[in-house]
Structure formats: C-alpha cells, structure tokens
Image (cartoon, rainbow, N blue to C red):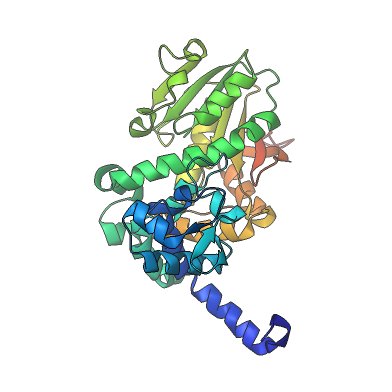
Amino acid sequence: MTDTDYPPELATAARVKELAMGLWVSAMMMTAVQLRLPDEIDDKPVEAAELAARLDLHPEAVARLLRALAAHGVFAEPAEDRFAHTELSRVLREDHPHSVRYQVLWTVAPWTWRAWPHLEEAVRTGERVFPRLYGKEFFAYLAEDAPRSAEVFNRAMTQSSTFTSAMVAEALDMTGVRVVVDIGGGRGHLLRTVLERYPWLSGVLYDLASVVASADPALRPGGELADRARVVAGSCLDGVPPGDLYILKNLLEWDDERTVTTLRNVAAALRSGGRAVLVQNLVDDSPEPKVTTGMDLLLLLNVGGRKHTRRQLTRLLSEAGLEITDIRPTASSLFVIEVARRAPVAGGA
C-alpha cells in the first residue's frame, strides 16, 4: 500500500500515535548517543553487526534501534541491517561543528523521566514539582546530588552558546560601552566572543562559584584575554557587579519573583545612560515553537519558571522599573532585547 492509498483517517490516527510515542523516541536518541553510535558511523553505510562488534553490543538489537530511529529520519537504512547518516543523525556526533549531543543528553537527563509524569499536577496548581520529588531546589540538586547531570548541563549550555555567540555579539550595540557584564554567563563563551569582537571592551563574567570554577581559560589569569576580563563568583539574586552594559542570556527563566528580583538588581546597578540586554527566545515569535513551548513546560516542572511572551516580559520589566527600548532578531532563535530604566512619567511625582 502506498502513502496515497492509506486512508486519511488512519493517517491522522497514526500521526497522533507518533506524537504520543515521543517518549520512546527520546529513549532511542538517548541510547544511541550514550552508546556513541553516531560517532562510529562515518561517510559510508556500515553493517549493524560491525558497529556491535566495535562497541561490544548485541548486533540484532543495534539494528533494531537504528531502524527505529531511521523511521524518524535519524539515520537511514539503505539496505537491510546497513545504516548510514542523515542530516539529523550527523549532528549527534560529538565532532560535528553544530553538534547537539549534549543538548540531547540534557533534554533526557535522568531527573526529567521522574518529573514529566507529574505535569498534570503542575498544570492543576501552576507550581513546580521538583522540590517535592527530590527534596531540594533544582540547582542545589544538580550541584550536590547529580554532578554528571550538572556537567551535561554545562556542556549543553556551552554547546548552545557556541552556535549563537557570534550572532549575538554581532547584534549588540556597544556604543559608549567600556565595561560589559555577562550575568549568569556560565563558562564565559559569549563574553569571550564579545571581547574578541570588540577589542576596546573590558568584561566581567558573573555566575555562581560552582560554575565559574570552570570558566574559559582565556578569561582567567594568564589567559589571552585576562588583561580585559574578570571572573567574579556570586548570585544575581543578591546583586550584580558595576558595568555599562549587562547581558542576561537565557537567564530569566525562573519564577516571576526571582526574575523581578534579578531585574531590580540590574536596574539598581545601572550607571547613568547604562543599558541591559536580554538575549532570549520569545514564545509568541519563535522560529522554533515546538522547542520553545516544550522548554516552557519543563521550566514549570523544575523551577516554576517560564519562557516569556513580549507582553509577559514587558510586565516584569515594568515591575523592576525598566522598559524595552529595542528588540532585534539575531540569525538564530534568540532576540536581543535592549532595556533601560523606565523614563519618569511627565507630570508625575
């Protein structure tokens, strides 16, 4: 039976079943990546038995796994039990210039398998479920109980930043800026890119001590950018270092209270004429709506957070005494959103 002969009502039902089986596909991709099957396939098709021999796996089970993924376009099976790369499977290789290996592993980290079944509870209450399931806050759990997941998270963030940093740096307006502060900047890939692009700038990498402990060597004492960079440990919930331009990339993803606290700390630290730049997705204008809305629900589960629409973001900024002055798209799914202190209302107190 060809696709054109397949009854439309059955095709509709099949599509719904495919969506419901998304959990299965996640498990397939996680397994293939963990076993490094994408890394073992080069430019030519290879027998499943050969892959199994190299990796000490069961040959028939390897063929079944790759065949199931091939049905979703991840790998191809040009002949029975012979498998080749597709565009989707190639980016699972660790050496691919646009590898998503660690982003995939982060998406299916062990804690997610326990959290997602409680989505109904989160939708009923609007509250995060992670503390009840694990007995502590999400990031405390990563730091104290799940070092492997924490490492995957940091690598995933670095991998994502590698894709987008140059695009973001190009979209920034550095007019009048001498000191840029990257708040929650992770290991500093974006800050390094910014300092390399704008050689007159000095920069501060600001994140939790457990994160900046593994900051980019170029930003550390003795590094190639050390004369223009400082690495500072701290929490943006307590305050932020002084600077002319603050960058907050994918940071404002927790609950509204902590988001407003962070923004108020930025507003308080802004020098006269200073600006802040939010670099993030917008739910209502995303080129990746499935990714953005799915991540929005994951943030509800683990930290009680969210991805924002323009209206939601405008409201939170207003509560912190800030306002949007410009929004510019980048060549990625991210927007550069410039904000400044809200201008006083004419005739107001």
Q: What residue sits 74% from the left and 35% below the top?
A: 346
Q: Residue at x 46, y 34 (%)?
A: 184
Q: Do we see residue 176 in this rendering?
A: yes
Q: Residue at x 47, y 13 (%)?
A: 226
Left or right: residue 227 compared with residue 78: left
In this picture, is 309 found above or below 129? Answer: above
Q: Quadrant of residue 125?
A: bottom left
Query: Residue placed at 64% from the left, 83% from the top?
Result: 11
| Left or right position of 340 against 21 | right
Horizontal and vertical percent position of residue 207: 42, 31
Q: Is residue 254 visible?
A: no
Instruction: Look at the picture and state if 197 lies above or below 100.
Output: above
Quarter of the image containing the C terminus? top right
Left or right position of 82 against 221: right
Residue 19 coordinates in the image, percent (x, y) = 54, 73
Q: Quadrant of residue 113?
A: bottom left
Quadrant position of the N terminus in the picture: bottom right
Count of labels shown? 0
Q: Nearer the viewer, residue 35 or 249?
A: 35
Rendering quarter of residue 237:
top left
180 or 63, nearer to the observer: 63
Of residues 259 and 61, which is closer to you in this image? Answer: 61
Task: Please state if 344 lies on the left or on the right of 114 as rendered.
Answer: right
Q: Is residue 165 above or below residue 134?
A: above
Q: Position of residue 53 (x, y in %)?
A: 35, 56
